[in-house]
């Protein structure tokens, strides 16, 4: 009985955490806006204990900041905060790619990644690329990065990459939808796809240093894309969470 109650509390915490995160990243909760425990209970429908835990988890993720007088505030981020988080993820993914190359990966293990590449190639044949194709790219790109991480066969490293990717805006597809409004959108995805292809080639050929270097460069491309997205905020409806980020000119 007690075990079922614990499971229920954990489930409510996760649901409350996801609901509150969605409110923040959708723009429903704005930077600097205060969130009280009672308010979170009302908006999520969860009870107070799971909501309290959810708020603490969102603080740990970096989306909320505790207020000394009580409650939490939606955090705003600097461009440097986000670029540092992306660089961190890229460093860890580079290590994962090196481990995969040095430890060896079978053709069968690489097949799911190559299937992702083929599906992305199909999307990129659209000129111009549609919003729906961008959305599909987000899913495929996330899968590619997750599969690549698993090839490292390093549970400690996989856990750290998961944590780094959970940092605000640091996930592999964090800015893809915002890029869709840019004139150079298609070229950005083509370059990223070239990186995907090269890292698979490096892993196949057991070239650890090369695999690591390309994944770190892949993250630097994401940082450049962040700057482009912040300079072009005319389509905030595609990624409302951009409002949480202060650009260098703000």
Image (tube, grey):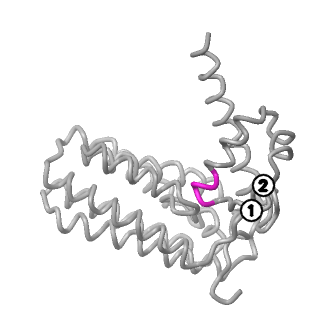
Residue denoted by label 1: 67
Q: Is residue 228 above or below residue 156?
A: below
Residue 43 at x, y percent in the picture: 84, 42
Query: Is residue 59 found inside the magenta-colored segment of the image?
Result: yes
Instruction: Classify mark 1: helix, strand or loop.
Output: loop
- Front one among 245 and 34: 34
Q: Is residue 143 left or right of residue 10?
A: left
Q: Is residue 22 above or below residue 80?
A: above
- Front one among 75 and 237: 75
Residue 89 at x, y percent in the picture: 41, 62
What residue is at 80 percent from the left and 61 percent from the top?
Answer: 69
Magenta residues, as a range? Answer: 58-62
Q: Is residue 16 left or right of residue 128?
A: right
Instruction: Classify mark 2: helix, strand or loop.
Output: loop
Residue 3: quadrant of the picture? top right
Residue denoted by label 2: 71
- Quadrant housing the N terminus: top right
Quick check: marks 1 and 2 in contact, CB under 8 Å?
yes
- Quadrant housing the C terminus: bottom right
Q: Is residue 24 left or right of residue 220?
A: right
Image label count: 2
């Amino acid at each position: 009985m007690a075990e079922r109650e614990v499971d229920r509390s954990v489930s409510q915490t996760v649901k409350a955490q996801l609901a509150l995160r969605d409110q923040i990243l959708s723009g429903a909760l704005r930077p600097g806006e205060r969130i009280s425990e009672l308010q979170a209970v009302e908006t999520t429908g969860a009870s107070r204990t799971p909501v309290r835990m959810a708020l603490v988890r969102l603080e740990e993720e970096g989306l909320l900041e505790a207020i000394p007088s009580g409650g939490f505030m939606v955090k705003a981020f600097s461009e440097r905060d986000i670029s540092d988080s992306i660089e961190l993820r890229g460093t860890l993914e580079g290590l994962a790619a090196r481990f995969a190359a040095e430890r060896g990966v079978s053709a069968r293990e690489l097949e799911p990644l190559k299937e992702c590449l083929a599906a992305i190639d199909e999307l990129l044949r659209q000129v111009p690329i549609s919003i729906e194709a961008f959305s599909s790219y987000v899913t495929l790109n996330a899968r590619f990065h997750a599969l690549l991480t698993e090839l490292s066969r390093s549970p400690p490293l996989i856990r750290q990459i998961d944590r780094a990717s959970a940092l605000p805006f640091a996930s592999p597809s964090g800015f893809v939808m915002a890029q869709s409004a840019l004139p150079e959108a298609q070229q950005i995805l083509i370059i990223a796809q070239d990186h995907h292809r090269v890292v698979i080639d490096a892993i196949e050929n057991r070239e650890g240093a090369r695999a690591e270097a390309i994944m770190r460069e892949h993250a630097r491309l994401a940082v450049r894309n962040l700057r482009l997205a912040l300079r072009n905020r005319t389509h905030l409806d595609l990624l409302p969470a951009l409002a949480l980020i202060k650009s260098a000119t703000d």
